[in-house]
Image: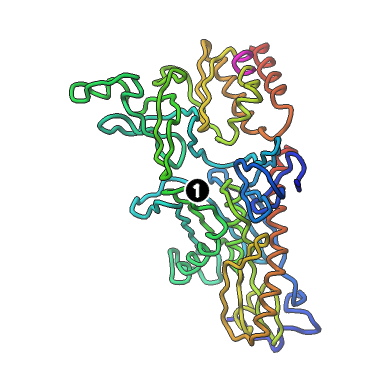
Amino acid sequence: MTKEPEQFIVDGKRLDGRKPEDMRPLTIEAGVLEKADGSAYIELGGNKAIASVYGPREMHPRHLQKTNRAVLRCRYNLAPFSVEDRKRPGPSRRSTEISKVAREALEPAVFLELYPRAVIDVSMELLQARAGTRTAGITAASVALADAGIPMRDLVASIAAGKVDDTIVLDLQKEEDQLGGGDMPIAYMPQKDKVTLIQMDGNFKPEEFEEALDLAIQGCKEVYEKQRKALEEKYTKVEEK
Amino acid sequence: MIHVEKRELVIPGQIIAEGDYRLGEGVFKDGDNIRASLMGLADERGNKIRVIPLEGRYIPKEGDRVIGIAEDDYYAGWILDINSPYQGRLSVSSLLQRKIDLDKEDLAKYLEIGDVVEAKVQEVDELMNVTLEVTDDEEGRISGGRLVEINPSRIPRVIGRKGSMISVLQGEGKCELSVGQNGRIMVWGDERRQVNKVIEAILKIEREAHISGLTDRIKEFLQKESKGG
């Protein structure tokens, strides 16, 4: 366990030197896998994740088909080597829950009604986990969906806001997440101005909640610009080859 | 009013126009705005607006010519894999263009599982049940030749404007082609070397689909190769 620092914010700077409203360095690359229909690689601070998309394709088993729309099937998975102590492979209570909320965060963006009886498989593999994996996963998955040529209303960008030393900060790092006062990941569609995921642990006063939500939405808009750039770069890069 | 340049790369959710347009593929209406639903190139022609997709699976559309592979049979026909999330159904009477006595004849005589068929999409219902037919324009069961599979979103480039690319491939490549909208292409030729070259050219089109001057490059590619041989 990490030792609790006496103060999270000294002279307006956080443990890793960021200001409260800064996020960790973020890089996204689209189209990294050859065999998947769409894919994306993301690094958010120490987090590393690959998202892949297959589909739309025929749904098996057939009793899970929906006759009026496609099914979005999400899988969030931590690699055994992604955390400090080896993680026992396989689904867990936590990863099952995150798979569900990630699906619900992405579903409103996808035109599922265009593909009745089909399935779109989305997988988020976390290679290295350092707090904020669900937001990294959702951000990458949304880029992978666009890369697969799946019709969407908007991209989904995701980032967390939180509270340390009674200050609202963006994109918690590991120590802040584990020992800080609260954590609030959100997913957001910037063009539609709609929040598709909001979770919270810790205690927030109503005005702190408002402040955190605003900060996280600002953060999502920053993430969105990186997503857009990643998708554009995929095609400008090919041209140079 | 249009918000993007011609052939600009757009991403899902991006506003591409405002006001009265006819909507093609890859766009949707959101109040007054018209937004892209796909990543692709914005294209405006007359008052019709659409996004040309760069990726994506084949989704059957009425009237499309497709190349299917028989996967299974049912009492009066076959189920074809058409390189899509949905399978196509082809009845024996449509394939033969006549009625046959199902009690007396064995369907395997006309089409075996694994056989390749050129057909047309006759109907797609709201549940995406796909009915195929063989008319006078389609070959039906295909024999000989080589089958190539590419990304269905690149098929318009293989055909070219008013069929310009396909005539280059057939003329310079000395081969005969049948192009299915579902990303499958049949190539027939007398010489195996020629067939290989045309297939290489098709794969080149798939890789370089978004770079302009493609037809000329393919022409050059086929001419250069045939001199060397």
Residue B172 forms part of the magenta stretch: yes
Position of residue A8 in the picture relative to residue A99 (left or right): right
Q: Which residues are magenta?
A: B168-173
**Viewer-closest of B106 and A114:** A114
Residue nearer the viewer, A178 or A199: A199
Q: Name the residue at the bottom extreme.
A: A6
Which residue is depicted at the point 55% across and 60% down? A108
Q: How many marks can you see?
A: 1
Locate residue B223: give its quadrant.
top right
User: Which residue shows up at 42% across the image and 52% down it?
Assistant: A68
Q: Chain of mark 1?
A: A
The picture places residue B126, in percent across and down from the top left corner, at 43, 44
Image position of A185 with respect to B28: above or below: below
Q: Which is the main secondary structure of the residues drawn in magenta?
A: helix
Q: Which residue is mark 1?
A: A114
Indicate yes or no whether the magenta region holds residue A211.
no
The part of the image, by quadrant, that contains residue B123 is top left
Quarter of the image with the C terminus of chain B is top right
Q: Quadrant of residue B47?
A: top right
Left or right: B221 as drawn, with respect to B91: right
Closer to us: A169 or B165: B165
Q: Is residue A187 above or below residue A55?
A: below
Check disc 1: other Cα within 10 Å, few if <14, some if 14-19, many if 20+.
some
Q: Nearer the viewer, residue A241 or B212?
A: B212
Residue at the (48%, 56%) spot, across then down? A72
Above or below, comparing residue B41 to residue A219 in the picture: above
Mark 1 residue type: Leu
The residue that appears at 59% across and 59% down in the rendered structure is A49
- Res A125 seen here: no
